[in-house]
Amino acid sequence: MNRNQIVRVAIPLFGTRVSPRCIYSDQMLLVSIKDNEVVSRKIIDTGGMSDEERLAQLVNLRIDLFICGAIEEDFIERADSFGIRVIYNVAAEVEDILSALLSGRLETGFGLSNQAGALASSVRAILLDREPVEESAQKKDRIDCVECIDRPCMENKSCTNDTKDLFLADEYSDLRHSMEVTADISAETDRKLCRIAEFIYYCLGMEYKHIGIAFCVEMFQEVEILTRLLRRFFKVSTVCCRIGGQTQHDAITAVEGMCCNPIGQARVLNSLKTDINAAVGLCVGCDCIFARYSEAPMSTLFVKDKSLANNPVSALYSKYYINDILKEV
């Protein structure tokens, strides 16, 4: 930052932290910085605003730097066109963010990827303080790879436990091709494949022609993009979670609203004779039910996480989320 110039910073709030998703933030902190010091602060209301309204607000406020959690790439590109720099995927207390900004340490991923090791250690400490559900005596009679001390698997060595009966080559005879394709993809060293690319390569390697997608109604936009991408390679059939149109009150529970129908999704795709099915954004219970009733092989392509921009693993790197989970359980 230019020390002699006033830099206007905006941070969407969730309590005393940056909001995990700015679109759900009802307040935003405005900070002015000069000579590497915070010279003013102000909190404004942003509840109910669309992305377009939020961007227009940033432009009108002449914001130079927008610090946020998860955010759409399109928003970042549009903000950049107005000269607004965006530092995103930030997960931390506001005071820690400002301290990092003033010291030149703040960058995209602050509080998540950049501090994953330290945060993971802190999270482990939190969990170790919590009374375990199982008694230690019960642990002796079962396999627990996490508690394994030697971990020979990390060095590509055979497991030292008495598990010879767990890997029987004959059981993989019908799955040999699938395992070979999987191994080829895992051995990719020239580039790091994203999950969707890995799914496409697997389907091509397996010579699949017809893909089924069982998706959540809340992810129509993402599935539309995904479907158009996959249709460059395959025939694609899509089924929304609300197929059948029954209300929860009439069908299962006394809760008002449309009822999800994972069995119906599976039956539709079964009738279409898909080669493989992908679950996209289904709730945990619906995901399990769909997997049970799907006749074709099934893979969860990506999941829904309303708090962490569909990236649930991020919670494991955050003391805030771990503590919040422990309070709820």
Image: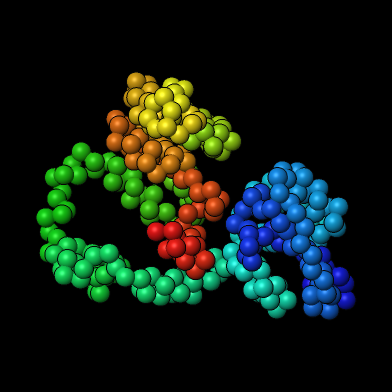
Identify the residue shown where x is 41% and y is 37%.
278
Query: In front: 284, or 213?
Result: 284
Using the image, determine if residue 61 lies above or below residue 231: below
Q: Position of residue 105 (x, y in %)?
A: 66, 74
> Left or right: 49 with respect to 176?
right
Residue 269 visible within the image? no
Using the image, determine if residue 15 lies above or below residue 52: below
Using the image, determine if residue 161 lies above or below residue 203: below
Using the image, determine if residue 106 lies above or below residue 72: below
> Left or right: 109 with respect to 80?
left
Q: Position of residue 73 (x, y in %)?
A: 66, 49
Query: In front: 270, or 69?
Result: 69
Identify the residue shown where x is 66% and y is 69%.
94
Residue 290 visible within the image? yes
Query: In front: 66, or 189?
Result: 66
Q: Quadrant of residue 170?
A: top left
Identify the residue shown where x is 35% and y is 29%.
263
Q: Quadrant of the N terminus?
A: bottom right
Identify the residue shown where x is 19% and y is 44%.
172
Q: Position of residue 62 (x, y in %)?
A: 85, 58
Q: Position of residue 245 (x, y in %)?
A: 46, 22
> Left or right: 61 with respect to 135?
right
